[in-house]
Amino acid sequence: MSKFIFSSPGKYVQGSGVLDELGDYLPDLGGKSFLIADDVVWGIIGDRVQKSLKKANVAFHYERFNGEASASEITRLAGIARKAGTQVVVGLGGGKTLDTVKAIADELKQNVVIVPTVASTDAPCSALSVIYSDEGVFESYRFYNKNPDLVLVDTHVCAQAPVRLFASGIADGLATFVEAQAVLRSHSRSMVGGDPTIAGMAIAEACEKTLLTYGYSAYTSVEQKLVTPAVEAVVEANTLLSGLGFENAGLAGAHAIHNGFTAISGDIHHLTHGEKVAYGTLTQMVLEQRPDEEIAKYVRFYRAIKIPTTLKEMHLENESFASLVKIGALAGGEGDTLGNLNHNLSAEDVANAILAVDAFSKTVK
């Protein structure tokens, strides 16, 4: 029996300078706030956040995020929040911080506010977290019964972050419609456990169109730390459209292969989430026999925003075929989403496609 589910955040607020309004939203969500950020993020925006909360008479407790979205870090921070007696959890930063914060709010059964400081992933809007071991190896997806209550995105803050992270968000977002189409074709389930909705598919398609239309000009603006209409459009695509699209239309090969990369060690792990997802997207395109020119279009676009498209750029040029098979095996493991592309793919099929992307990319002019 078909079942259609659409899930979304309670409220999404985006614009230049909206970080200064954070305190205004918190009283209705619980009041006393447990703030989580890493040292770098807190050093950049901590003063503004504290000023906003004090102006709104919101009490808070700040705690440092240690860097990995792992079960032990979730347990540690949830324990501190309980002792502090806070009523709402607020995450400030990048994808792993925000995934951790969602898990803490779930543990405490409290509202959660997400404040991304980079437009580098589609994690902020979703009702799930990607959980890793303390060593950074993918372990599982953790699902929640509701999406964040508020996602607040200050585009000025995002535009001050390194442009590489902005490009990473574009690359992550470009996987959305590619994977959604695979889920629809295979009659698989979305990340919220239903068939892909018309709304989810339309949002995923709008995400791709927005990124391919405005992504490069937005990238060049962020290189200069500027906020333009193109930057606003791409931040929305990276964060809201990609988040709603992947959750309500589903994931397939691109993100499974990204997770598969955690099966091996090495310099690949110096790359961003989006950089690895981009190579996974190209690998999925090879596995589903997409037309050469379509794959080439993606390769050219990735190159324009300095996203890796070869094994050398991925720091995988010296990996053995056996290592690539390990990537394929983890990507196809139980609990991941490679089966939404094709249930019959072997680990060797994935390894061959990884090599084929490299060979093809080298020929694209």
Image: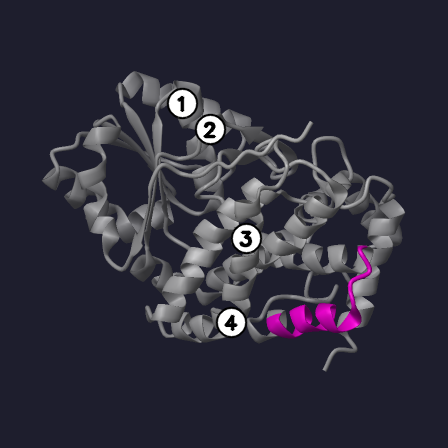
Q: Nearer the viewer, residue 170 or 206?
A: 206
* Residue labelled with disc 3: 202
- The Cα–Cα distance between marks 4 and 2, rounded to whole angstroms, is 35 Å
- Can you give x and y, in whole percent of width and height, for residue 224 in the image? 37, 75
Marks 3, 2: nearer the viewer: 3
Q: Is residue 177 left or right of residue 253?
A: left
Which mark lies nearer to you, 2 or 1?
Answer: 2
Residue 88 x/y as whole percent: 30, 27
Q: Is residue 123 above or below residue 111?
A: below
What is the crowding at mark 2: few (fewer than 14 residues within 10 Å), some, or many (at least 20)? many
Instruction: Please name the residue shown 27% across and 23% down the image.
Output: 86
Q: Position of residue 57 (x, y in %)?
A: 11, 33
Looking at numbered disc 1 in the image, what kind of residue is underneath it? Answer: Ala
> Residue at 27% across / 50% down in the picture?
45
Q: Which mark is residue 213?
A: 4
Q: CA distance from mark 2 to mark 1?
A: 9 Å
Amino acid type at image mark 4: Thr
Disc 4 versus disc 3: nearer the observer: 3
CA distance separating discs 1 and 3: 37 Å
Residue marked by disc 2: 103
Does the residue at mark 2 contact the one at mark 1 (Cβ under 8 Å)? yes
Residue 296 shown left or right of residue 169 in the figure: right
The residue range painted magenta reads 288-301
